[in-house]
Image: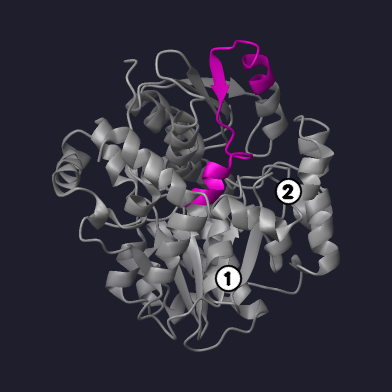
Amino acid sequence: MGNHFVYGPTFAEMRDPSLIRYEVRKQALALKHKDPLHPLNLFNITWKLDDLKIPHVVLPRELTGLDANIVVMIARHFPTGAHKVGPAYSCLIEKQLAGELQPGRDRLVFPSTGNYGIGGAWVGPRMNYESLVVLPAEMSAERFEKIESYGARVIKTPGSESNVKEIYDKVHELKRDAKNKILNQFAEFGNYRFHFDVTGHAAQEVVNGIGNGKVAAFVSAMGSAGTIAAGDFLKQQFPDCRIVGLEPVQCPTLYDAGFGAHAIEGIGDKHVTWIHNVLNMDWLICIDDQQCLKGLQLLQEGTDVLMAEGVKADVAKAFVDNFGISSVCNIIGAIKTAKVIKAGKGQNVVTIATDGFDRYPSVMQRLNKTAGKMTHEEGRRRLDIFRKADVKEWVQEGTAFHRTRWHNQKYYTWVEQQGKGINELRALADPEFWVKEQAKTPEMDKQIAKARGF
């Protein structure tokens, strides 16, 4: 690790990479495959491909059974293969600009249940920081391999996806060393801003030319609750847009203050995150983790089944490698959302494929052992996971009562355990608080451009 400062793209450049200085973008694109660990790859943090198109798929009616469009944005083309590299960068760059972080002096700690830790493991060393990732021991083997391959160190904590308390306990221990600086995705508004500004704009752009060109609903499972911030942006652009949050049936924390372990890696962390604007959420839907696992196996390995059921060959083949477990959770949730809001022909329900299949082969191997291998007949049955997605239960409307309860649930993690003040919690109930956080990116961009010299 060096001790000099590295600065990457502005928020505007992450939204639109054509704004990046020509020679910098040209070098960054060349290094994407030639040298993916080169710091200039920071300029490849964007939803857009080299041709400036946003990768996405509109799910066919043969899969969804719907007249409405289910539009899925694909994130596996980001550096590290998941969009969480964006929040890792935005959280780091904001603190570096504020003078709170300095390469060579500070060691970064990224508490995570998956993709944010992988993003931090990539971003931190690229920006000359020694980096630690705190991750539950029962996450997929591929996640640990990626983190270490990027030059970061892993500290494993007991449990699985839902064991965030154990992560926090380890973080408290690490904070005793002044060298360790915590970049907590669950509380850092750099995470919120990346998704409000960058993911939100991408979702607005992707529906241009699809259906009526509007977003009827934005659907996202909550891990850090960063991604769902895109819904705040979309609701400003499309006032009728509904924001729909998803969590596991096996860990229904917002739904009924429930708890438990589950298998949808990246979401359902048994607490309501500080940066989640719950007072702007319209619906909450719970998704079964086994349906996500079995649905992923169908989309990944069941191309022949899908084609036999009427899905066009090029569409079925495009599903391969593009989805992870939480992606399928989002897809099932988007189908259920369309039914809940009675979305019709021409209306667009937008969601995110947060990562690709590359970090789940070991999970599929475990599924084969527990559920048996997927035969053609079993694959046909699994189509009902999508086609017959049920909305008779595990659906909760964001009434004034429920929104207030979701907000109040933040108290137990953030005030009792994490040292936030009660007045800070009350401030989150004011819509103006969120507007002020949203408005900070233009000034950030000026500071980034000035610091890097272009």
Q: How crowded is mark 2: few (under 14 residues within 10 Å), some or many (20 or more)?
A: many
Q: Where residue 346 appears, x then y in whole percent? A: 47, 87
Q: Measure the alpha-carbon separation of dots 2 and 1.
A: 27 Å
Q: Which residue is drawn at 52% across and 65% down?
A: 331
Q: Where residue 383 appears, x then y in whole percent? A: 51, 70
- Which disc number belongs to residue 251? 2
Q: What residue type is labelled 1?
A: Lys
Q: Where residue 105 appears, x then y in whole percent? A: 45, 13
**SS for tag 1?**
helix
**SS for tag 2?**
loop
Query: Which of the image's four quarters has the C terminus?
Result: top left
Q: What residue type is labelled 2?
A: Cys
Is residue 82 shown to the viewer in this render? no
The one of 261 and 51 positioned closer to us in this rendering: 51
Q: Where residue 2 appears, x then y in whole percent? A: 31, 15
Q: In this view, does 128 lie to the left or right of 326?
A: left
Q: Which residue is situated farthest in the top direction here?
A: 177
The one of 178 and 33 positioned closer to us in this rendering: 178
Q: Residue at x 73, y 61 (%)?
A: 279
Q: In this view, does 11 lie to the left or right of 225?
A: left
Q: Which residue is drawn at 76% across and 34% down?
A: 420
Residues drawn in magenta: 170-194
The residue under label 1 is 235
